[in-house]
Amino acid sequence: MEVIEAVNDLRKIIKEYKKQGETIGFVPTMGFLHNGHLSLMNRAKQETSIVVASIFVNPTQFGPNEDFESYPRDMERDKRLCEENGVDILFIPTVEEMYPDGYSTFVEVAGDLTRQLCGRTRPGHFRGVTTIVAKLFHMTTPDSAYFGKKDAQQVIVIEKMVRDLNMDITIVPCPIIREADGLAMSSRNAYLSPEDRKNARILSRSLFDAIAKIQEGERDPVMTKRLLTEKINSVNQAQIDYVEVVNGKTLQSIPRIEGDVLIALAVKFGKTRLIDNVDVSV
Ligand code: PAF
């Protein structure tokens, strides 16, 4: 595995591989890798000949009072995991490399897609995500890029950016990877106290209960939201940011549960904000 810090070096090596007819699969991450990330690398390895992963904690997607400084980092462990999971090139730029002094260009998917759900409590977050992902796409010129569906809204926003900017890249959304008790894997799970970690099981449990009710015939999004909200609120320490039942493509609210539906939530346990979702096709 080659570990690269400079954009120019990355471009050179990728150009060489492309000349030889290799296909590039790209897995962008912010590090502190878990099995969710590793599943993306493994999928990329199956579908493309050269896997490029990046580790970059991107300051522009964090709000002023968010966890940029404290975001968990462990580069030595991450390098080892990348190597063990088939990554050929690991790109680990510095903040100065990605945002040199005077940097002033941003990529923004405007409108409801970025204003709903996480966009409501994290204004500017998706602008930071699309800016860094667009930059990384230009640098790695991948054939395919792999994203976890835990960040369902992020996937939808990136797909829209790729369509709107005519980027010749296939976005591959990959399944959520869960702990044995159902908690969706996330680097931020590392923040949870043992008690909050136990309480956080309510997220997947309430989502799975909602799916069961829909399978039994429930079609009312308001009732489904109520069921989820009551379940989550039964855990005293849980502070709901949002619980939404929306169209799985447009993220707009829906009058009835039918077609592609996304049930998504964000809940805080202490200072840790967790997100989770399920997609339902009725
Ligand atoms: O999902 C993430 O880890 C980040 O939002 C991403 C896509 C790597 C951009 O910084």
Image: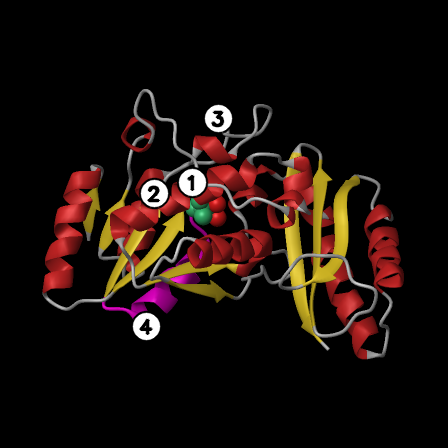
Are there few (<14), some (14-19), or many (20+) residues within 10 Å of tag 4?
Answer: few
Which of the pair 240/238 is nearer the observer? 240
Residue count near mark 2 (Cα–Cα under 10 Å), binned few <14, some 14–19, many ≥20: some
The amino acid sitting under disc 1 is Thr
Quarter where residue 99 is shown: top left
Q: CA distance from mark 1 to mark 3?
A: 20 Å
Determine if the C-beta at disc 4 is less than 8 A from ligand 1: no
- C-alpha separation, residue under disc 2 versus residue under disc 4: 25 Å
Query: Which residue corresponds to mark 4?
Result: 46
Which residue corresponds to mark 3?
69
Label 2, on which residue? 135
Q: Which residues are magenta?
A: 32-49
Rendered residue at 77%/51% (across/down): 243
Mark 4 secondary-structure assignment: helix
137 vs 119: above or below: below
Q: Relative to residue 253, is residue 10 drawn left or right?
A: left
